[in-house]
Amino acid sequence: MSDPQQLAVNTIRTLAMDAVQHANSGHPGAPMGLAPLGFTLFTRHLAHNPADPEWPDRDRFVLSAGHASMLLYALLHVTGYDLQIDDLKAFRSFESRTPGHPEHFMTPGVDTTTGPLGQGLGNAVGFALAERLLAARYNRPGHEIVDHRTWVIASDGDMMEGVSSEASSLAGHLGLSKLVVFYDDNNITLDGPADWSLSEDVGARYAAYGWRVLHVEDPNDVAELDQVMKEAASAEGKPTLVTVPSTIGYGAPNKANTSAAHGSPLGEEEVAAAKRFYGWEYEPFTVPEEARQVADQTERGLRLQADWEERFEAYREAHPDLAEDFERVMAGELPDQWDADLPTFETGHGEATRKSSGAVINAIAARMPELIGGSADLSSSNATTITDGGAVHLEDFSGRNLNYGVREHAMGSMMNGMALHGGLRPFAGTFLNFVDYLRPALRLACLMGVPVVYVMTHDSIGLGEDGPTHQPVEQLAGLRATPNLVVLRPADARETVGAWVQAIRRTEGPTLLALSRQSLPVLEASDADEVAHGAYVVTPDDANPDVAIVATGSEVHLAVEAAAQLAELDIAARVVSMPSWELFEAQDDDYQADVLPPDVPVLSVEAAASFGWSRFADDHVALDHFGASAPAEDIFRNFGFTPEAVAEAARYLVEEWEDSDE
Amino acid sequence: MSDPQQLAVNTIRTLAMDAVQHANSGHPGAPMGLAPLGFTLFTRHLAHNPADPEWPDRDRFVLSAGHASMLLYALLHVTGYDLQIDDLKAFRSFESRTPGHPEHFMTPGVDTTTGPLGQGLGNAVGFALAERLLAARYNRPGHEIVDHRTWVIASDGDMMEGVSSEASSLAGHLGLSKLVVFYDDNNITLDGPADWSLSEDVGARYAAYGWRVLHVEDPNDVAELDQVMKEAASAEGKPTLVTVPSTIGYGAPNKANTSAAHGSPLGEEEVAAAKRFYGWEYEPFTVPEEARQVADQTERGLRLQADWEERFEAYREAHPDLAEDFERVMAGELPDQWDADLPTFETGHGEATRKSSGAVINAIAARMPELIGGSADLSSSNATTITDGGAVHLEDFSGRNLNYGVREHAMGSMMNGMALHGGLRPFAGTFLNFVDYLRPALRLACLMGVPVVYVMTHDSIGLGEDGPTHQPVEQLAGLRATPNLVVLRPADARETVGAWVQAIRRTEGPTLLALSRQSLPVLEASDADEVAHGAYVVTPDDANPDVAIVATGSEVHLAVEAAAQLAELDIAARVVSMPSWELFEAQDDDYQADVLPPDVPVLSVEAAASFGWSRFADDHVALDHFGASAPAEDIFRNFGFTPEAVAEAARYLVEEWEDSDE
């Protein structure tokens, strides 16, 4: 390696060490071991433009080992991104652009938020898949306007997490040949040597998934790294895993190759010793001019993007409509008239809301090519199939339906990657109960604010015979408690239309639809547009009701029947359908008080945990225990979800209320 | 195959078909394909005793493909368990002993609840590990009183789920040689051919994990199955995967080998046709006498258990103390004096509750050999190490600390298996935020009522610099909403002692401890015994407070400081520490009203989502958005968690309350 290169590599190492030391917190070891790899990738292979981190055809880079964030920040700084030495000095401080783990919404050049292990790899499979999907949609002979790679650095921890296994199996299945994962096989985890808990042959496992497996002998040899990256970049119809036996804390005389170098600052003395080992003679946070010169990618980046833009103009010339549509989808803009064909439904029409959802999906998909569906092996149950969309597979990426297999977690994580990539609006389904399998990915969707849609069907004990292992109870509460998620549980086909409209319009975060297995009649007063308010009155309005019954989804029907029974007892019950707590709470106080007057007792009815409902209601018809295996109607009846039981609970509440008013 | 054997195999098939048809719901295809395997296993290899499904040294059987429940029910019936034809006729009906998926608490002979895919395999690794751990503890030369196998049937779906990848990697790592998994490689999933989403080489993947891989050529050939099972049973220091290319819906002329045979009744006509194919000439739900004779295991079972009991008596003679202890741990009884060495803490002593938890763990572990710890690669952060316990590994199962690696989901699922096996009380740790990774396993622990303990540390934004990807916000709400889980968030070292006492005493379900990263001083009035009540007053009690501030964990300290500030404004604020909602709600109304008087306004303070707190409080100091990366004190301050802000919120609430009273 020539001297300026070595200097640049050591600059990356020392910036990482200095920042961790300065913050007195962080993970110095991995950046020290991986600096040569990062340098080689960012200066010779990664197609990127520091001046425009949003260039659509750039390569994506995912630091799945997110704890090594200082490696990425140092690379972004030395290659010329708008991330300054002062930013590095602010590492891990409040609202800095250099948080403890990479947050894509905080830092230019960070393509995804990582840290929870395995998620980065799952996202990366989504990025690589998005590239193939968009290439199939927009490229034309002689016009390869979508043509980029996804590069990943993954750690032992990433390899151990189940989500990465699921996503890697799918990447092999789909032959995502532009995906390259460097496995930082440093043999150290937080607890100690990785072989305390990991003795499998990771390379052989990836070969079994259908990946090509390459190996780096000397992770400090830039020439060898360069050679291996060249080979990795020459696609062979398979994704590539490169095993890299790096040395954690490389150069630290006492802590290299130990878990002490993993997650804590090295200490001033060890930092000084490592710097001596590198022959480093500068002040902390110094980037020597020679290092900057070999590292800076401003010129290469501008050239790469300019070349692409020239090609894109030729494409625009040849295919103006496609070019326009490409720009639209990459900007995340909805097409005109996307909602022109939304179905309408007659009062009384009986249909499971999952079926209604399937009809809406198809009405929208026909006008919104960026909508891409899928399911975790439940596509017909979830009604998620885009009928004329075809399946995505190895030999044909023009399809619109993804067969994720029984891999909910990879599904969630890959959707995040696709949404972050841009150009696609992914949705996917499973049973609501199995949202638990993808919760870490859903949480990151909320944190990152990506507009994916979860189509969660079989949303209660109404699922029936499959029993308590498949029936959600506590899930709605946990989801409603999650920041930046909008949950919608429509009561009938009309509200399902409204729910999808909300989901498609929402660009600042994910939306979850909870849909019924069982058939539900369309209500007299239900209204797709009212869904936007989160809650509204569905019985003929009485200005002075004795009681309000607020319900969601299938239980709105119970509430309506109960209200009719109460009317016979001269109790005026207002029924409120509340498809979405979040949208209702976003309304002004007047609207909220109009729907649920403060001086009227409120009964909530939902076949789920009562947890949280005390925010709106004084008493609850709820399910604070697990379900059972039986036909749905038997379960509902046995667990007290009948019009009679709801009416009785409402009557009792009215009495109690009157007593307490006396 | 001799005729009675074939008849027995077909009996199992037809019982499954008849029950699904009768229920008009269920999964007939897998039982039809796997009946020969089930028959061979249950009659020739599985060491079990239908008369005593709880025999401690029986082999364990896990139907990870839980949807094939009728295979298991038919096998239990024909081999002689207390499961009658009437039970089979009640398949999938309310409160029957034959629910849609196997529930271990409903049916004799069902070792674990399965259905959510991958979990059974994870449980099975826990069962097999428990056997090795107990063997190392109780066996003595010439006395192999713990010596049994764990047999599993797993489907394509099980193989795709990440949790099974994690658990299988660990099973290979630990060389669990008495674990045998039959992989039902029937190439059909719910959506269609498995190769729509699965093209990996599953056998090669398991070989990479360090498993032995065997293969069955003809899944209908009992002699071959018998031979392969013999081979699988001869341990070679590795777990064994047997690939079984069964035919889903075998014998159904129109639906065999299609997804139509997977999850729906075949229909009367197809059932009749399949029965003709089998040459079956009996009424529905018939068990021909010749079939029952070859299938019944009553005699073999009694002999097997009697032989073991004889050996156990010899063991008791030679090692009376060990024998007594073995019986105690298998009965799930606590040892005398288990709590004799619990630590005590002086007021003002400052310590993170995770550290206090570590001290309690060690105090209990010294007196409770069945306590077995572990962590998902965060053992020192979680303070979960049993100091003198040693690590469990391939060559030494006498250790007490499991290195799960970064595999939270397998950890949760394996703990379920160990707890169900009996003889062990497993606990394990990760960061509270990463409870999301093991949620499906936690839910099954709640449903099954197994007494595992989750040691969840770094329980809020107090985690600090690692940032929002690592800071829980909505998790406590989601967990509190979960049926049969007790969540404890202690405020200091003393409450941590009380929390562990609750966790150990609780036998009917799991317990989750939410513990601080940051140091917390021991409160003047905190009390380990009071934790049993869920909530109690920690400030010198005033019978007529102006306001009550209810807080949990680290925020109790904020509340105490705020109360002192309020006192200076002549506002009497009562501070209530509420380590556990569930335990508080289990108290009688008088106690609850005593702690939180109905006529006093209540402010809740918790660095987590406010969701749910309206059950107890009128206003909230809470965190209804994601966290941030910074030193903990900076985050708390920036997000309004200061004594001043709490005092101000309380003052405001008192004013509002007075206004509304006017």
Image (cartoon, coloured by chain):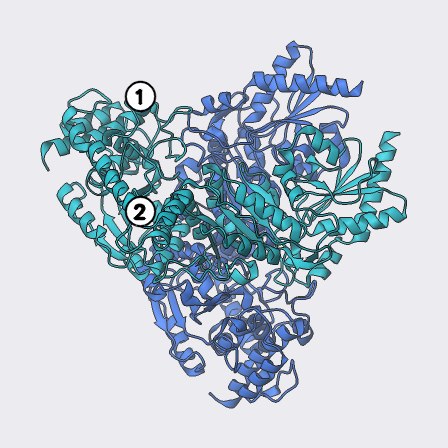
Chain colours: A blue, B cyan
Mark 2 lies on residue: B317
> Is residue B206 among what the camera can see?
yes
Secondary structure under badge 2? helix
The Cα atoms of the two marked residues, 1 and 2, are separated by: 44 Å
Task: Identify the amino acid type marked 2.
Answer: Glu
Q: Label 1: chain?
A: B
Residue at 53% from the left image edge and 73% from the top image edge = A261
Q: What residue is pinned by disc 1?
A: B86
| In the rendered image, the vertical position of residue B6 relative to residue A45, given as above or below | above
**Image marks 1 and 2: residues in contact by CB distance under 8 Å:** no
Please tell me how crowded label 1 is: few (under 14), some (14-19), or many (20+) other residues with Cα within 10 Å. Answer: few
Residue type at mark 1 is Asp
The foreground one among A589 and B446 is B446
**Residue A154 appears at what percent x and percent y?**
46, 66
Which secondary structure, mark 1?
helix
Look at the image and tell me whether residue B277 can be seen.
no
Which image quarter holds the C terminus of chain A?
A: top right
Residue sitting at x 68%, y 46%? B527
Q: Residue at x 65, y 21 (%)?
A: A539
Q: Name the quadrant containing residue A208.
A: bottom left
Query: Image quarter for residue A383?
Result: top left
Mark 1 vs mark 2: give the one in front. 2
Q: Decide which of tag 1 and tag 2 comes sooner along the chain.
A: 1
Using the image as rendered, state which of residue A27 and residue A341 is in the foreground. Answer: A27
Q: Is residue B19 left or right of residue A543?
A: left
Q: Nearer the viewer, residue A483 or B194?
A: A483
> Taking A167 as reference, is B529 above or below it?
above
